[in-house]
Amino acid sequence: MPATAPAPHRAPRARPAAGRSAAVLVLLAAAALIPLLGPSAALHGTGEAQAPGTAGITLLRSVVFAALCVPLGEVFATRLARRVPGAPLERAPRPWAASAAWAGCAAALGLAAIVANGNLVPQSLADLDLGRLYDTRDGRLALLEVNAFLVAALCARSRRPAGVALPLSAVVVAEALRAHPPVEDSPLVGSGLTLVHLTCGALWAGGLLYVLRILRRWRTSAPEAAVAVLGRYARVAAVLFAAITATGVCSTLRRMPPGTVLDQLTGTAYGRTLVAKVLLVAVVAVLALLARRRLRRAADGIAACAPARAEVVALGLVVVVSALLTAVPVPIRW
């Protein structure tokens, strides 16, 4: 009896990667345009004056926030991966912490130069007054951020790269203090809220980025470990999201009294930017829930990567809009 010929192997159906790539490019283009067009769009019709250099400040703060997210997220995700039995940590993705820290240092230098020129974009080196960096609160905080990013870059190249968390914590503290000057009512309360909000946001965005890189690196050699890391991240991300939401609501109510919230959300640049950020966070939350649902129900946990990739891109937009939020006028009513 002749042997039965083996059935021909059918090639797997190609995924519609073109549409996803186009969507990612559109989101990246939007992130690049936010610093350029965002300030004028947010201020249009509000009667508020746009400060000189708002677009440049937004871009620099976007780099600073991203430079916080990447290294802190790598430390966070690496600790999660170490708790997974059998995780091939020796084949972990190459860290981007050093490059991110150097980028943050350059952006912090740019912000320090603006402070040295009286919060105006300098046109030449002659405009800089270094005395402002040592004699003013904003100047000292700007110098602290520059030095902290420099130390973080050196730590990232050392034998203990997790040490970047310490200097970057100093950057978070400096940003929290800068956002709430002493003339504000209860500035320490506001700084504490910003501290928690910024820390949780950096861990959420940066952690997801590194987890997705782990998934891509381990998807063929150790898929079970990769999915386990994503599952651990998803559980912690739910707590981070709750903390971000709570601190965000409290910070909004401090700056916008309950009786004026609706008017200021539509009538001020700060309120409009805040609405845009809330809508983006809502999109991120939906994508996170979709990824978690696929992670639980799909036979192959790698299927959760698609919404998770969209989530990390949307989180990038949130980072840029958050930077814009720090550059527009704050409607504080004392």
Image (spheres, grey):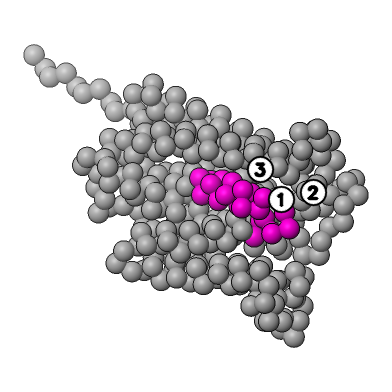
Q: Marks 3 and 2, Cα distance to the nearest angstrom?
A: 14 Å
Question: Quick one: SS at disc 2?
Answer: loop
Left or right placement of residue 183 versus residue 76 in this view: right
Q: Earlier in the sequence, mark 3 or mark 1?
A: 1
Residue 143 occupies which quadrant of the picture?
Answer: bottom right
Q: Main secondary structure of the magenta part?
A: helix
Residue closest to the eye, 197 or 73: 197
Segment colored magenta: 178-202
Q: Is residue 319 visible?
A: no
Question: Quick one: SS at disc 1?
Answer: loop
Question: Quick one: SS at disc 3?
Answer: helix
Q: Nearer the viewer, mark 3 or mark 2?
A: 2
Q: Position of residue 73 (x, y in %)?
A: 44, 50
Q: For residue 251, which numbered disc appears in the image?
A: 3
48, above or below 243, in the image: below
Q: Position of residue 68 (x, y in %)?
A: 51, 57
Residue type at tag 2: Trp
Badge 1: residue crowd in 10 Å (few <14, some 14–19, many ≥20): some
Q: Marks 2 and 1, Cα distance to the nearest angstrom?
A: 7 Å
The quarter of the picture where the N terminus appears is: top left
Contact flag, marks 3 and 1 (Cβ < 8 Å): no
Residue in the picture at 55% in, 32% down: 285
Tell me, yes or no, whether the highlighted magenta stretch contains residue 189. Answer: yes
Residue type at tag 3: Ser
Contact flag, marks 2 and 1 (Cβ < 8 Å): yes
Q: Which residue is mark 2?
A: 334
Q: Which residue is mark 1?
A: 185
Badge 2: residue crowd in 10 Å (few <14, some 14–19, many ≥20): few
